[in-house]
Image (cartoon, helix red, strand yellow):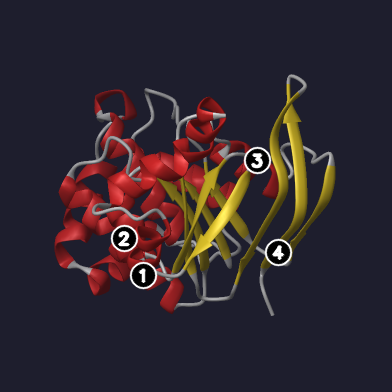
Amino acid sequence: MSILVINSLAFSHNDAPLFNNLNLHLLPGEVVGILGNNGAGKTTLFDLICKLRQPESGEIINRAQHPAYLTQILTPPPRLRMIEVYELITHLNAPAKTCFHEATTRLSAWSPALSRRYSGISKKKASTCSYGEIRSFFTLTLLLMCSDLIILDEPTAGVDPEFRHFIWLGIKHACSEGASVLVSSHYTQEITASCDRFYMLAHHQLEAFHSADQFLARYQATSLDEAFISASTSLEKVDVAS
């Protein structure tokens, strides 16, 4: 049984349609990606799933008992050390209390190098952390909370290659431990390579794909970026031609 199902979802913003007959499903233990241009509605879709907005029509069936949501905007109090941010996140979101030592022990099992870098950031004040360090720390903390549904809105945006690798490693381990992950990104390569399935959000709808080859074939493209651009603009080209 799917942990998340979206059927015939419709939503408008400022009287302009954003979604029309949008459909999606997510199975337990799956990682599913969402690709889409800026402004396509990825964040709005996640807000709808998390009940921060209300759809105009359609249904969202969310069977998660302990969901977690990484939003686009992260602004921890600048004077807090990141270990205190960890305690705040887990206090507000974790289904069970997990001390920081337990978290780093789990990270060590995933990757000793990841645990060392995460621990290093935990000692810094938020005001001295880079955007990528804060985003990586938040993402990995959510992946450690034993949530059954984890929604990540562009977790690797502004993140260096090492932490990008660690984030996807964390996603893989969270899914192996029972989580389902819905993740958006602008990086076509990481979505097609790391997700079980993915959707392209364009022209108010989601189109489902099971592989990079299917995505390339659908748009007769020779590269993933070319397919992404074609998916985003193909209807516009038709409209201009007509």
Crowding at mark 4 (Cα within 10 Å: few <14, some 14-19, many 20+): some
- How far is disc 1 from disc 4 in space, using C-alphas? 21 Å
Residue at the farthest right position? 57
Which quarter of the picture shows residue 79? Answer: top left
The kind of residue on which mark 4 rests is Val
Whether residue 101 is visible, yes or no, is: no
Crowding at mark 1 (Cα within 10 Å: few <14, some 14-19, many 20+): many
> Residue 172, labelled with which disc?
1
Q: Secondary structure at mark 4?
A: strand
Q: Are marks 3 and 4 in contact (CB under 8 Å)?
A: no
Q: Nearer the viewer, mark 1 or mark 4?
A: 4
First-in-chain label (2 vs 3): 3
Q: Are marks 1 and 2 in contact (CB under 8 Å)?
A: yes
Q: Are marks 4 and 2 in contact (CB under 8 Å)?
A: no
Circle 2 residue:
168
Circle 4 residue:
5
Question: Could you tell me which residue is drawn at 28 percent across and 54 percent down?
Answer: 189
Q: Secondary structure at mark 1?
A: helix
The kind of residue on which mark 1 rests is Lys
Q: Are marks 1 and 3 in contact (CB under 8 Å)?
A: no
Which residue is nearer to you in this view: 201 or 107? 201
Question: Could you tell me which residue is drawn at 61 percent across and 63 percent down?
Answer: 95
Q: Secondary structure at mark 2?
A: helix
- How far is disc 3 from disc 4 in space, using C-alphas? 15 Å
Q: Position of residue 184 (x, y in %)?
A: 45, 48
Q: Position of residue 198 (x, y in %)?
A: 47, 61
Question: Could you tell me which residue is drawn at 37 percent across and 54 percent down?
Answer: 140
Circle 3 residue:
47
